[in-house]
Amino acid sequence: MSRLNYHHLYYFWQVARHGNLTQTARNLHISQSALSSQIKQLEQAMQVQLFERQGRTLTLTESGYQAMNYAEEIFRQGEELEQLLSSGGALSSATIRIGTLSTMSRNFIEQFIQPLVNQRECRYVLQSMDQTGLLHALSDHQLDLALTNIAVRGTNKQIWQYQQLARQPVAVIGWPGKALSPTLDASYQHQAWVLPYGDNPIRSGFDAISAQYQLKPYIMAEANDMAMLRLLTRDNDALAVMPEVVVRDELDSGMLTRYALLPSVYEPFYAVSIKRQWVHPKLNSLLDAFSASPLAHGDDLPGGNGQSNT
């Protein structure tokens, strides 16, 4: 049995929000001593101190600050639940919580959530974290959906629902004006490169192709974050390998160009959720909208047909 009394937590939350015991007691129509007693019982039950008391001033302790953040979410969701039950149906305005892999393309994420942007009645929260964090947050019901470019692995895969949203070709990107072939050949031999770092399928594909064509690339920089690769490519006279969606704005403006596509190298994008009886009412429509978009079919290619943009 949980020791947490939500009635006591509500009183704590109100005091923490207003910062004044006397005024909060007046707003709640109870005596100041009764309110103070309720908070004291919460502290005793949880074996923590939530406020520092200095005369008439109350200051949140570190534990109090953490409790305040959780209480904000608990009672906000409580209000949503009240609306849901009173309406007798699905609450389309409930907050949809989407986790995103911290190293994946921001342009891809932006395009995925585009259907939510102009829906004033729908609130959404984006949280960026690593793959382990995403899966833990999903299993703890802190997220409705996670976006990642890493396939779900492990022995507990049966708890996940995941689908591949898109499979984007990987291109060689750089400043315009280079005399390079639309296929990897000797013209790429002495170029500088910025590349994904570590255990990355794009990097593995590039290394395999380099070996196949006997290229010995000069690696100027490595990064495991697509946003950083985008900046390094934009600000340095070096070639990079990435899906074109990562540098869509720079390609459209002519700041960067695509020189070639890496044969048989793709970056997959996945949507991952946890199996549950009830899902957010907008989740399926969001996935359906993306499935119908050009990006889901690998059509978000400024060069169109895989030929050089030079």
Image (spheres, rainbow, N blue to C red):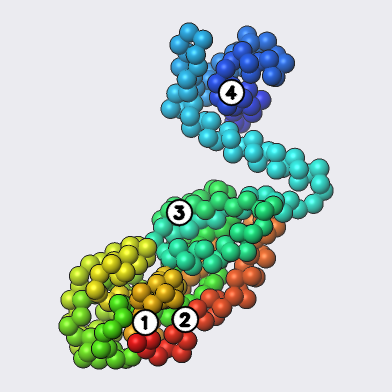
The residue wearing badge 1 is 258
Q: Is residue 118 above or below residue 178?
A: above
The residue wearing badge 3 is 128
Q: Position of residue 165 (x, y in %)?
A: 54, 72
Q: Which mark is residue 18?
A: 4
Q: Which mark is residue 12?
A: none
**Mark 1 to mark 4 CA distance (whole Å):** 56 Å
Amino acid, disc 4 = His
Amino acid, disc 1 = Arg
Q: Residues within 10 Å of mark 3 (few under 14, many from 20)?
A: some
Q: Given contact means CB atoms under 8 Å apart, are the residues at marks 1 and 2 in contact?
A: yes
**Mark 3 to mark 4 CA distance (whole Å):** 31 Å
* For marks 3 and 2 on the same chain, the one whose residue lies earlier in the sequence: 3
* For marks 3 and 4 on the same chain, the one whose residue lies earlier in the sequence: 4
Name the mark nearer the viewer: 3 or 4.
4
Amino acid, disc 2 = Leu
Tell me the quarter of the image containing the N terminus: top right
**Mark 2 to mark 4 CA distance (whole Å):** 52 Å
The residue wearing badge 2 is 301
Q: Given contact means CB atoms under 8 Å apart, are the residues at marks 3 and 4 in contact?
A: no
Say left or right for 99 vs 204.
right
Secondary structure of the residue carrying numbered label 1: strand
Q: Given contact means CB atoms under 8 Å apart, are the residues at marks 1 and 4 in contact?
A: no
* For marks 1 and 3 on the same chain, the one whose residue lies earlier in the sequence: 3
Secondary structure of the residue carrying numbered label 4: helix
Name the mark nearer the viewer: 1 or 3.
1
Secondary structure of the residue carrying numbered label 2: loop
Q: Given contact means CB atoms under 8 Å apart, are the residues at marks 2 and 4 in contact?
A: no
* For marks 1 and 2 on the same chain, the one whose residue lies earlier in the sequence: 1
Residue 8 visible to the viewer: no
